[in-house]
Amino acid sequence: MKALDTWERVLLTLIALVYLAFGLGIEGFLSPYALADSTYNFSEKALIALAMALLVVAGEIDLSIAATMALCSLAMGFAMKAGASLPLMLLAALATGLLCGALNGWLVTRWKLPAIVVTIGTLSLYRGLAQVVLGDQAITGYPQTLSTWGNGSLGDLIGVPALIVPIEFAVLVVAGLAVGLLLHRTLHGRRLYAIGSNPIASRFSGIAVDRYRMGLFLFAGVMAALAAVLLTGRIGSTRPNLAMGWELDAVTIVILGGVAIEGGRGSILGTVLAAVLLGSFTFALGMLNVSGIVMSMIVGGLLIVSMVLPRWLRLLQRGARPALRTV
């Protein structure tokens, strides 16, 4: 157990096993182009999972984050149809994400409502708005630049065709580093851990708990907008079912990454590794033509396992420690 004394090491081992097993069983799975394509399977989900991880560390949750993506994409589509330039389209998506996050944060901080109840309600509200406004229609015709952001590689940006790293994955790496530094290397990150461990004690110690909670919900809206821009560019359209069910994937990534659902514990590295593990695994299943319903069952199973296995490992490690000698 020494080699697996942290959850991040367990995830790294599982990732290695996934690539080894499917690399031997699926021809071309380990080719550079297939590996690059596999990142599209998790980059946008990982972006919203970063925001979800901060919320869960602080003892909160946002189940409306995927529905927020749909509204952000819708706002961007309406802006385009109104003749707005690309910067204004992006501003519309960002403003919508901030408004959705602000409503969630206001209900949680001002009215002291449980975040899980609030965001279940706003999930239905945001998704319902997108479905009522669009119906069975779709908005298409987005600028080529947006498609490049969603489907292109870094080589497309700098004119080096051999550089096939997807832009979405590069954005994820930068975002992961930024959020990781915030959580693990700043005073604000330590305060988030404190809020998640004991919000009452944190408030008495002078931490503006509600201000931090509001900030986290606003950040979730920003990340939803960013993910919506990339996803809309990748698929080239706005649809009411955009990112449908991704809130479950985001929660699975966060819990699988070792973030304690009760708050106060977890890491961004674990969250990113969990996204890679889940994304590469489902990408391989897609290459094997496994149906979507089976993948959903697997994701649900992983959510259960990811909650049970870390606890079991901690109990195992405690049991392996020698008992203190009493006199």
Image (tube, grey):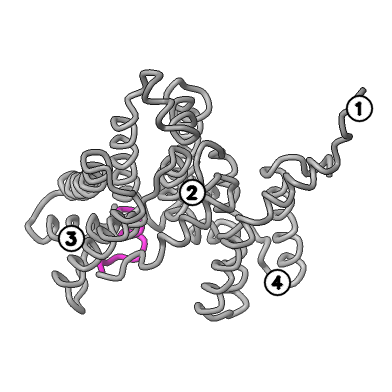
Q: Secondary structure at mark 3?
A: helix
Q: Residue furthest left?
A: 82
Q: Amino acid at mark 2?
A: Phe
- Magenta stretch contains residue 71: no
Instruction: Classify 10 Å Cα crowding around label 3: few (below 14), some (14-19), many (20 and above).
Output: many
Are the residues flagged by discs 1 and 2 in contact, CB closer than 8 Å? no
- x, y percentage for residue 143? 23, 57
Q: Is residue 264 found left or right of 4 in the rendered image? A: left
Question: In the rendered image, is residue 66 in sight?
Answer: yes
Instruction: Residue under label 4, please give it.
Output: 27
- 254 shown above or below 198: below
Q: Earlier in the sequence, mark 4 or mark 3?
A: 4
The mark that comes first in sequence, 2 or 4, is 4
Element assignment for label 2: helix
Q: Is residue 138 left or right of residue 49?
A: left
Q: Where 188 sits versus 218, above or below?
A: above
Residue 169: image tag: 2
Q: Residue beneath label 1, please?
A: 325
Verify whether residue 233 appears in magenta.
yes
Q: Quadrant of the C terminus?
A: top right
For residue 253, above or below residue 300: above
Crowding near pointer 1: few (<14 within 10 Å), some, many (20+)? few
Whichever of callouts 1 and 2 sits on the residue coming sooner in the sequence is 2
Q: Range of the magenta residues?
A: 229-239
Instruction: State the residue position of label 3.
Output: 77
3D distance between C-alphas at marks 3 and 2:
24 Å
List x then y, in percent, for residue 5: 76, 40
Crowding around mark 2 (Cα neighbors within 10 Å: few <14, some 14 to 19, many 20+) is many
